Image (cartoon, rainbow, N blue to C red):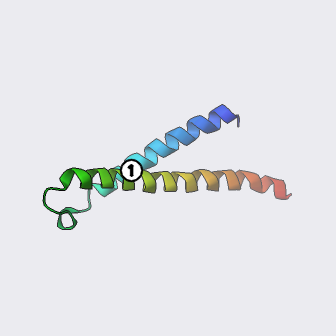
Amino acid sequence: MSIGQIAVMSIISHVVFIYITWRLMQTINFEPLIRKGRGREAQILILFLTIVIGSGVSRFFLEFLQWSQDLLFLL
């Protein structure tokens, strides 16, 4: 695989996993944890958490894929 193909696959993977994480985060009720008048800050925090979790899962997925391809070098 070329560097360009890996870059495209990485971008797509990150976007997909961030989107999936965003959809999952929408199902969690954060209302009891949010102080009155701090709704905007809470939304930004949820967005940042979504990016961190989605990127981490994507990175794991991409690394696992790379490791499985590298197993060919054991033989």
Q: Can you tell which quarter of the image residue 15 is in?
A: top left
Residue 53 shown left or right of residue 5 in the figure: left
Residue reaching furthest to the right: 75
Q: The disc labelled 1 sits on which kind of residue?
A: Ile
* Closer to us: 1 or 75: 1
Image position of 5 with respect to 69: above or below: above
**Residue drawn 69% across the image and 55% down it:** 68
**Residue drawn 31% across the image and 56% down it:** 25
Q: Position of residue 63 (x, y in %)?
A: 63, 54
Q: Position of residue 3 (x, y in %)?
A: 68, 35
- Count of numbered tags: 1
Q: Secondary structure at mark 1?
A: helix
Residue reaching furthest to the left: 36
Q: Quadrant of the N terminus?
A: top right
Residue 46 shown left or right of residue 58 in the figure: left
Residue 31 shown left or right of residue 17 in the figure: left
Q: Position of residue 20 (x, y in %)?
A: 39, 50
Image position of 4 with respect to 33: above or below: above
**Residue drawn 25% across the image and 56% down it:** 42
Residue that carries the numbered disc 1 in the rendered image: 20
Packing grade of label 1 (10 A; few <14, some 14-19, many >=20) is few
Residue reaching furthest to the top: 4
* Closer to us: 75 or 56: 56
Image position of 66 with respect to 8: above or below: below
Q: Position of residue 56 (x, y in %)?
A: 50, 56
Q: Quadrant of the C terminus?
A: bottom right
